[in-house]
Image (cartoon, grey):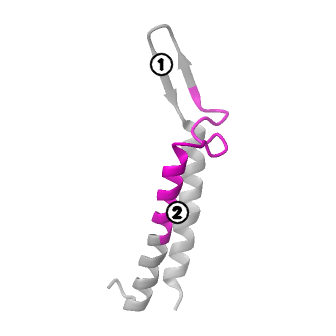
Amino acid sequence: MMGGTPLQFGKVLVFFGIIFIILGVLWIAGSKVSFFGFGRLPGDIAYKGKNFQFYFPIVSCLVLSVVLTLVFWVVSILVKRP
């Protein structure tokens, strides 16, 4: 198991399970309530023409990238602990 004990692997699975539960709840609630404008942050590119609409959430993607980087960094630290 990638050099770890089954107990450590179990902890990682529980951690990811909790993360997936939190993401699922946010996903369900997000359809009803916008979380601080996420997806429509300042800096996101939106263009509405007569017969054309373009939207690219560049700032939202950057925020999501930073959050996921921090989460995976913390997980890697927890996995490397003896």
Q: Residue at x 64, y 39 (%)?
A: 37
Q: Residue at x 54, y 52 (%)?
A: 65
Would residue 27 be counted in the magenta stretch?
A: yes
Q: Position of residue 23 (x, y in %)?
A: 50, 58
Q: Which of these two is toward me, 6 or 21?
A: 21
Mark 2 burial class by Cα count in 10 Å: few <14, some 14-19, many 20+ = few
- Point out the image quarter for the N terminus: bottom left
Instruction: Name the amino acid type tagged 2.
Output: Ile
Q: Position of residue 30 (x, y in %)?
A: 54, 46
Q: Residue at x 55, y 78 (%)?
A: 77
Instruction: Name the amino acid type tagged 1.
Output: Gln
Residue receiving disc 2: 22
Magenta stretch in the rendered image:
18-45
Image quadrant assignment for residue 58: top right
Residue receiving disc 1: 53
Q: Residue at x 49, y 81 (%)?
A: 79
Q: Is residue 6 above or below residue 25?
A: below
